[in-house]
Image: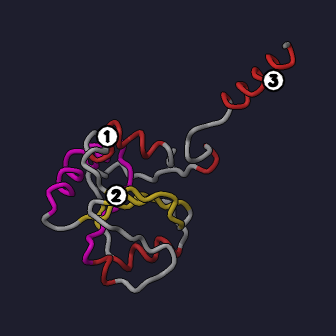
Amino acid sequence: MKKIIKFLISLLLVFSFTSCDNMKDEEKFMLKGNVENTQLIDINGLELKEMIELEESFVLVILLNGCSSCQFLKENIINPYINETKANIYGINTLQLDELERFDNKPTYKIAPTIVIYNSGKIVDTLSYDIKNDVFNKKEVFKAYLDKYCI
């Protein structure tokens, strides 16, 4: 009986030290910033391709002109987050993205808005819009989502 209890305790300890986060702290990247940042930084396709080729780490938001969900995310979640943290978060329009030829780590999307996390030029996560997902509706949930990948 004691062996079973010791085994169960050992098993419990192993699971309690296992992290549920997607990334270990040493795999997270520093989200660059600028004291003058107050809003999403618009980039074009060539700038995006260069950032990927230079193996930069960054957050990209794919947006569609005239999209009310995109506008809400940008104005009520992302820009207030940037204004508070001064983080560099980049935005690209779907039209500019669609015009680019295919290349390694080019982001794809099914719906706008879509959030893409890049670490060292590689996509580590893509989150497509879902009205039920509070990442797109609440600034504190958006921040917690970024905290999984960024320092």
Question: Any magenta on residue 106?
Answer: no
Compared with residue 112, is residue 103 higher up or lower down, i.e. above or below?
below
How far is the residue under mark 1 from the one under mark 2? Answer: 24 Å
Q: Quadrant of the N terminus?
A: top right
The residue type indicated by label 3 comes to Phe
Q: Looking at this view, is 23 or 14 the one in front?
A: 14
The span picked out in magenta is 67-95
Amino acid type of the residue tagged 1 in the rendering: Glu
Residue 9 lies in quadrant? top right
Of pointers 1 and 2, the one earlier in the residue sequence:
1
Q: Please give the residue where the numbered disc 3 appears in the rendered image.
A: 7
Residue depth check, mark 3 versus mark 1: number of the one nearer the observer? 3
The residue at 31%/40% (across/down) is: 84
Q: Where is 127 relative to 2, above or below?
A: below
**Which residue corresponds to mark 2?**
128
Q: Is residue 122 left or right of residue 43?
A: right
Q: Secondary structure at mark 2?
A: strand
> Label 3's element?
helix
- Report the number of discs: 3
Question: Mark 3 or 2 closer to N-term?
Answer: 3
Residue pointed to by mark 1: 84
